[in-house]
Image (tube, grey):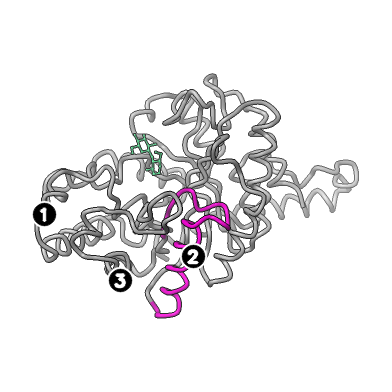
Amino acid sequence: MTSARRQRRKPGTRKTLVLGLAAVLASTGVVAMSGTAHAADTLGAAAAEKGRYFGAAVAANHLGDSQYVQTLNREFNSVTAENEMKWDALEPSQNNFNFGNADRIFNHARQQGMAVRGHTLVWHSQLPGWVNNLGSADQVRSAMRNHINQVMGHYKGQIHSWDVVNEAFEDGNSGARRNSVFQQRLGNGYIEEAFRMAREADPNAKLCYNDYNTDNWSHAKTQAVYNMVKDFKSRGVPIDCVGFQAHFNSGNPVPNNYHTTLQNFADLGVDVQLTELDIAGSGSSQAEQFGGVTQACLAVSRCTGITVWGIPDHYSWRSNDTPLLFDRNYNKKQAYTAVLNALNAG
Ligand code: 9MR
């Protein structure tokens, strides 16, 4: 069994343990006294009971914070490196790879039996200058191929899903591709080229397209990504999943049609995942939104997991918005309870 398979089994294994415990309790009559015997008490265990993972973005420089590590190990069963697997971190100069911080996170996750999501291979941001300076299509193509081969090769068989291409579409109403060096040198075809290269580099990884502001079904960007995935599926371009980053705030609220969006993508024959969930706010209104988003994922059978973009509020990329599930003292917020209850319900 490959280690990746072992990782993917973890949720099932936990489920078996939980169900086994439930059977013991039932045979001793304990269940009759306790209506909550099935309720898991961590996010990871509760998600596993629903056949899903619950992950967090992790930063290598916080792994020395014991409360951070304790919370990570207790609550989560999947990990995404917040910055450490991006192009600028891994290949700061051409063909010189540095996996130090990425491996630190990866090894921690593996030692804890957690799954790992790969983020991200081809993205216009956090891209080292040397890539932007490549002048010809052939140079960009071979740099992209080498990066994908080296990075996916390094973790081959051990990463359950990779964000192959990130944020390739413009915001607003145009539905256009973002004007990155990849788009400029290789044209529209670069996205599909990247997915084909990725499939060759690690045939066991699920290959995802990941983006933000693709939550509202009626938005042009959502439709543009949908049409791309539909086209890929119809032509056999290898794509397995779509990541919805899910960074919500008052200007970008959780839309009423969120379930429709997730279901419509899933109906194309791809998994969907909430990959960077955080919601600005506090108290019960934040909690309600977190609960609603969790329910929206659970209502779509191909929504295979949720990742929150950090653990305590003060380490968030937008800490002023207090957008996470734990406060700065690692207390569980109302939002935490709403997510846990949503996972345990139904
Ligand atoms: O959380 C990340 C932050 O630490 C970095 O400074 C930032 C730089 O671009 O990237 C953040 O993560 C982003 C993710 O990789 C892609 N989607 C948007 C996330 C928030 O900006």
Residue 35 coordinates in the image, percent (x, y)? 85, 44
Q: Quadrant of residue 187?
A: bottom left
Instruction: Let me know if residue 220 is in the magenta part.
Output: yes
Instruction: Let me know if residue 300 is in the magenta part.
Output: no
Q: Which residues lie in the magenta part?
A: 209-236
Label 3: state its secondary structure.
Answer: helix
Q: Residue 286, relative to residue 91: is it above or below? A: above
Label 1: state its secondary structure.
Answer: loop
Q: If the image is split into quadrants, where does the N terminus sit?
A: bottom left
Residue 12 coordinates in the image, percent (x, y)? 59, 58
| Residue ID for mark 3 | 196
Q: Quadrant of residue 254?
A: top right
The amino acid type, in three-letter code, at marker 2 is: Tyr
Label 2: state its secondary structure.
Answer: helix
Q: Quadrant of ligand 1?
A: top left
Residue that sits furthest to the bottom in the current view: 235
The amino acid type, in three-letter code, at marker 3 is: Arg
Q: Which residue is painted at 45% across and 67% down in the image? A: 240
Q: Residue 13, relative to residue 82: is it above or below? A: below
Q: Which mark is residue 134?
A: 1
Left or right: residue 334 versus residue 106 is: right
- Earlier in the chain: of badge 1 and badge 3, it is 1
| Residue ID for mark 2 | 226
Q: What separation in Å lies between label 2 and label 3 (alpha carbons)?
A: 19 Å
Query: Which numbered mark, 1 or 3, is in the foreground of this view?
Result: 1
Q: Give the class, few, some or many, for how many residues have Cα within 10 Å of label 3's Cα (few <14, many ≥20).
A: some
Q: Residue 315, relative to residue 289: is it above or below? A: above
User: CB atoms at circles 2 and 1 under 8 Å apart?
Assistant: no
Q: Which residue is painted at 46% across and 56% down in the image? A: 221
Q: Which residue is painted at 11% across and 54% down in the image? A: 134
